[in-house]
Image (cartoon, rainbow, N blue to C red):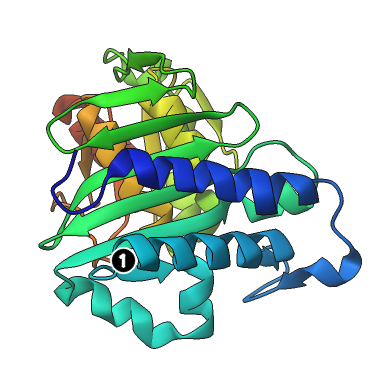
C-alpha cells in the first residue's frame, strides 16, 4: 500500500458510492437528471454528480493533504485541472466512466480513481458496479482482479500476435480530424476493432489479456491514469503517439497501449500514423 493513501479504503469508498448513488439510479433516471455538457454525447447525470460529491467529501476527510480532482469538479471549476502537475499528492476520480452507456441503460460503466504522488501515478482502481469487483494496481506490485470476499487474481496482458490477428479498441471519434480517415483505413490491417464507449471496461479488458491494443487521442486524467498504470502492471507497454511516457498532467499527444514494446512500435508504424 502507498504511504499516503490506503488504496483498499479508497477502493471500498468507490464501491459504497456506487451502491449508494449510482446503482439506485441505473435505468431510473428522469429526464431532468441527464444533461449534455460539451455536446449531445457528452453527458452528466445526477448519479455522476452525487457519487462524486460523496467520494470527494469522504476523501477530503480521510486524506486532507491530497488535492481532489474529479471530472465533475473540473467541469464546474476548470482551473482545478492546472493544479495536478504541481500537486505533491492527488486523488483523481471519474465517478461514472461511460456516462453515455449509463444514461442509455447499458450495463457497461465503471468508477475509477488514481493516486498521484510526486508527478507520477502510484495507484489505480477501476470498480465495476455491475460485477461488484475491482481491477487495481499499485506501482511495482502487479495488477489484480479483487472481489469483496477477498479473492484476488493477478492479471496479465495478452501475448503478442501478428498485426492481422490483433483485436482491440480505438476511440475513433476523438482522433485528429486531419488524420482520422487515414487511421481508420489503417485499422483494416488488424483482425478486429471495437469500442465500448467506456475506458474503464476497455482497460479492464486489456489488462485481463483479452485484447491487444487500445488507442486514444483525448487525454483527460480521470479517463486514463488508473487504466494505464493497471495496464503497465499487467505487463503492457504504454506511451503517447510520439513514444514519450504518459504523465498525469498530459492532456494531449494521444495514447497507445499494446502487449509489449514491439507490438506498440508495429501499431505505431502501421496504424497510428500521426
Q: Is residue 67 left or right of residue 166?
A: left
Instruction: Say which quarter of the image contains residue 125.
Output: top left
In the rendering, at what x and y percent does residue 221 appear? Answer: 35, 61
> How many residues crowd mark 1 within 10 Å: few (<14), some (14–19), many (20+)?
some
In the rendering, at what x and y percent does residue 5 appear? Answer: 24, 51
Q: Is residue 90 left or right of residue 21?
A: left
Instruction: Say which quarter of the image contains residue 15.
Output: top right
Q: Nearer the viewer, residue 56 or 212?
A: 56
Vertical order, 78 against 32 (above or below): below
Please report the residue visible at 24 percent of the width from the left and 61 percent of the height from the top. 248
Q: Is residue 172 visible?
A: yes
Q: Which residue is mark 1?
A: 252
Vertical order, 263 against 25 (above or below): above
Instruction: Say which quarter of the image contains residue 259.
Output: top left
Q: Is residue 248 left or right of residue 108?
A: left
Please report the residue visible at 38 percent of the width from the left and 66 percent of the height from the top. 61
Q: Nearer the viewer, residue 180 or 18?
A: 18
Q: Quadrant of the N terminus?
A: top left
Q: Is residue 225 left or right of residue 47?
A: left
Q: Nearer the viewer, residue 159 or 201?
A: 201
Please report the residue visible at 34 percent of the width from the left and 21 percent of the height from the top. 163
Please count the marks in the image: 1
Q: Is residue 189 visible?
A: no
| Disc 1, SS | loop
Please report the residue visible at 32 percent of the width from the left and 56 percent of the height from the top. 254
In the rendering, at what x and y percent does residue 166 appear? Answer: 40, 20
Q: Quadrant of the C terminus?
A: bottom left
In the rendering, at what x and y percent does residue 202 appear? Answer: 48, 35
Amino acid at each position: 500500500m502507498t504511504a499516503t493513501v490506503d488504496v483498499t479504503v479508497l477502493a471500498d469508498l468507490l464501491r459504497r458510492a456506487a451502491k449508494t448513488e449510482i446503482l439506485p439510479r441505473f435505468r431510473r433516471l428522469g429526464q431532468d437528471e441527464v444533461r449534455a455538457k460539451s455536446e449531445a454525447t457528452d453527458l452528466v447525470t445526477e448519479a455522476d454528480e452525487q457519487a462524486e460529491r460523496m467520494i470527494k467529501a469522504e476523501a477530503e476527510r480521510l486524506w486532507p493533504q491530497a488535492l481532489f480532482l474529479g471530472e465533475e469538479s473540473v467541469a464546474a471549476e476548470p482551473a482545478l485541472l492546472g493544479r495536478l502537475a504541481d500537486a505533491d499528492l492527488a486523488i483523481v476520480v471519474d465517478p461514472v466512466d461511460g456516462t453515455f452507456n449509463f444514461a442509455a441503460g447499458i450495463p457497461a460503466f465503471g468508477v475509477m480513481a488514481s493516486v498521484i504522488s510526486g508527478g507520477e501515478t502510484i495507484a489505480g482502481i477501476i470498480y465495476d458496479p455491475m460485477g461488484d469487483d475491482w481491477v487495481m494496481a499499485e506501482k511495482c506490485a502487479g495488477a489484480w482482479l479483487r472481489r469483496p470476499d477477498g479473492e484476488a487474481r493477478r492479471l496479465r496482458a495478452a501475448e503478442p500476435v501478428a498485426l492481422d490477428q490483433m483485436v482491440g479498441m480505438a476511440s475513433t471519434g476523438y482522433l485528429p480530424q486531419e488524420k482520422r480517415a487515414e487511421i481508420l483505413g489503417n485499422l483494416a490491417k488488424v483482425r478486429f476493432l471495437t469500442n465500448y464507449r467506456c475506458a474503464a471496461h476497455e482497460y479492464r479488458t486489456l489488462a485481463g489479456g483479452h485484447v491487444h491494443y487500445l488507442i486514444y487521442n483525448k487525454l483527460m486524467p480521470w479517463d486514463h491514469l488508473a487504466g494505464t498504470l493497471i495496464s503497465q502492471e499487467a505487463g503492457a507497454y504504454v506511451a503517447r503517439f510520439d513514444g514519450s511516457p504518459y504523465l498525469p498532467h498530459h492532456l494531449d499527444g494521444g495514447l497507445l497501449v499494446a502487449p509489449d514494446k514491439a507490438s506498440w512500435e508495429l501499431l505505431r508504424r502501421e496504424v497510428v500514423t500521426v
